[in-house]
Image (spheres, grey):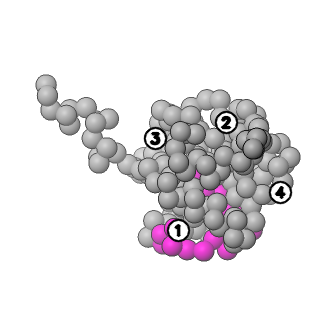
């Protein structure tokens, strides 16, 4: 029984990176942005997006090669590529291309990319989210990692009003000099 492919968790090339945003998050994102998101840079579809939005970038559009000129952005990126997506989202905010961003992330403060959002208001989700499979049959699967919602913008109180029931919200303090 030495066949490594006998165990699917040891064959990452066969696993999908297509896991869509859970409904409990979609509902809160719509509430936070008053019903409509301007841009989803990691959308599953332009015709039937998981996150209703005015503009969607799909994998074919390559959201990392686009300017995110939008007042409101929601991002649930492929977590396998957090090292690319998180710094780019922060750059779009810092450069003024996007006014407000809500990011659904795999919470992992041990990574280098975490430093790009470590100073942002966040809600650490207190349960495992059930993501919607992108395999076409809409099955649900619980994440095997903790998740967080990150906010970049000026409406911090509203952010916590909309998302804090999911877990523990806080505004990180800066490290003392």
Place of residue 51 in the rendered image (x, y in percent of width and height, measured from the top left): 62, 57
Structural distance between the alpha carbons of marks 4 and 3: 36 Å
Residue in the image at 28% along x and 36% along y: 10
Find disc 4 in the rendering and name its residue: 154
Structural distance between the alpha carbons of marks 2 and 1: 26 Å
Q: Looking at the rendered structure, which numbered label has been put on residue 139?
A: 3
Which of labels 4 and 1 is toward the front?
4
Boundaries of the magenta span: 61-76
Find disc 2 in the rendering and name its residue: 124
Q: Looking at the rendered structure, which numbered label has been put on residue 63?
A: 1
User: Do the residues bearing badges 3 and 1 touch, measured as CB atoms within 8 Å?
Assistant: no
Residue 97 against residue 117 in the figure, above or below: below
Residue closest to the far top: 1
Q: Could you tell me which secondary element the residue under label 3 belongs to?
A: loop
Structural distance between the alpha carbons of marks 4 and 1: 24 Å
Residue in the image at 13% along x and 25% along y: 1
Place of residue 170 in the rendered image (x, y in percent of width and height, measured from the top left): 76, 38
């Amino acid at each position: 029984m030495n066949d490594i492919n006998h165990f699917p968790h040891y064959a990452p090339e066969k696993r999908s990176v297509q896991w869509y945003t859970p409904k409990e998050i979609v509902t809160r994102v719509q509430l936070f942005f008053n019903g409509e998101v301007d841009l989803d840079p990691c959308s599953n579809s332009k015709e039937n997006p998981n996150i209703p939005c005015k503009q969607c970038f799909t994998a074919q559009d390559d959201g990392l090669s686009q300017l995110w000129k939008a007042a409101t952005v929601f991002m649930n990126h492929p977590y396998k590529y957090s090292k690319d997506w998180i710094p780019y989202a922060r750059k779009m905010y810092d450069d003024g291309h996007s006014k407000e961003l809500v990011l659904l992330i795999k919470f992992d403060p041990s990574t280098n990319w975490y430093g790009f959002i470590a100073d942002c208001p966040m809600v650490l989700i207190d349960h495992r989210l059930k993501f919607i499979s992108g395999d076409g049959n809409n099955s649900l699967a619980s994440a095997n990692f903790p998740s967080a919602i990150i906010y970049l913008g000026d409406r911090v109180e509203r952010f916590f009003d909309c998302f804090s029931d999911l877990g523990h919200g806080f505004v990180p303090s800066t490290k003392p000099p």
